[in-house]
Image (spheres, rainbow, N blue to C red):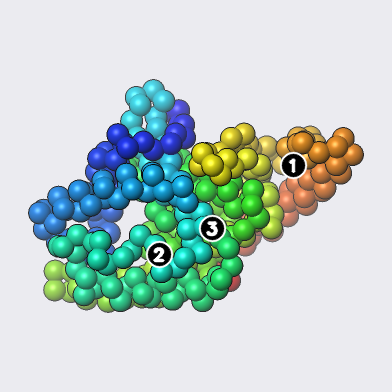
Amino acid sequence: MSLKLAPITEDDAPAISTLLIAAFKDDLYQRVEYQTDESLVELHKYETKKTISLIQDPTRVLQKVIDTVTGRTLSFGRLSTPSATANIDGDDNDEDDWPESCNKEMCVPYMAKMKEMKTEILGERPHYQLDLLATDPEYQGRGAGALLVRWAISYALAEKVPLYIDASQGPGMVLYQKLGFKLMKSFEIDIAVDGVDQKYLTCGLVFEPENTYYKCGPTHAVVAISETVDKHKGRTTSGGYCRQASGRGAAAGREAGQHQGAGGSRGERGRGAAAAGQRVTGLAANQAQRRILEGQHRRRGWVMH
């Protein structure tokens, strides 16, 4: 299976809505928010219309991951730019626009808690937000979601602003923290499912772009992303790449420096290469410590930062 990023078009909207509902079919929140087949049909219409609207919004970027062999869409993401996130009251969660069958008694206070948590974490800092990430249940854990997270991270790295994600309890939490996100805050709400009260946990995570090298995949791998963001067309070019980090890290450092210094003078590129080489070498030297910390992380659960 070969994966590829591609922009979402208006023709994709119905299929994207179907994928979204399928991806969250076992999520407690969706099960209570939309409790009947009729409400799910209404939700599908709502999400299709919303996707088309967001495609037309220059402050949002929508991307999908496709299997290049079959052409099937495996995953998709919605990213809000700092221009969109600056208006905290102007997001997509206006209750007047929600489907009539939505459980507003639960949704309204829940959305308010999400906004409050995000404000406590970031305040008024400019930031990107990965509003939504959904993967076809048949293809979860096969790299499509990770590709979209790295795509979103590339924007934060390019503009040196944080990337925010709110996430419920599940496999996504492990993925986000593996790719460099820190869990900042969380809250719980009570949800009654089939007459039984259950806790539903929501977490706020932040990726800080201070370090352009972060772990991905094998413990001894680092990734450097230096994508260029075309703000007007809402696209990224010049994709990220992975390099094996050796004790020296020189080759990866030189190549990363060329990316970081692209467009500058030869001297600037040289300085960029030297600095990048030091960062790669430093990361390689700390791999043993990372393995120890990650083992502690798995045993203790999520680490609050």
Query: Left of 188 or right of it: where is 243?
Result: right
Under tag 2, what secondary structure?
Answer: loop
- Mark 2 nearby-residue class (10 Å; few <14, some 14–19, many ≥20): few
Give the SS element for disc 3: helix
As measured in the structure, the alpha-carbon distance from the residue carrying label 1 to the one carrying label 3 is 22 Å
Q: Position of residue 211 (x, y in %)?
A: 69, 54
Residue at image point 85% right, 42% down: 268
Marks 2/3 in contact by CB < 8 Å: the verdict is no
The C terminus sits in image quarter? bottom right
Q: Quadrant of the N terminus?
A: top left
Is residue 28 placed above or below 257 in the rendered structure? below
Amino acid type, label 2: Gly
Q: Report the Cα–Cα distance between label 2 and label 1.
A: 35 Å
Q: Which mark is residue 260?
A: 1
- The mark that comes first in sequence, 1 or 3, is 3
Identify the residue at horizontal 29%, vertical 40% (top origin). Answer: 13
Give the SS element for disc 1: helix
Label 2 sits on residue: 90
Q: Nearer the viewer, mark 2 or mark 1?
A: 2
Furthest residue to the top? Answer: 69
Instruction: Give the amino acid type for the residue marked by disc 1 in the picture.
Output: Gln
- Depth check: give the residue in front, 195 or 296: 195
Q: Residue at x 45, y 68 (%)?
A: 88
Q: CA distance from mark 2 to mark 3?
A: 13 Å
Quadrant in the picture for residue 140:
top left
The residue labelled by disc 3 is: 82
Nearer the N terminus, badge 2 or badge 1? 2
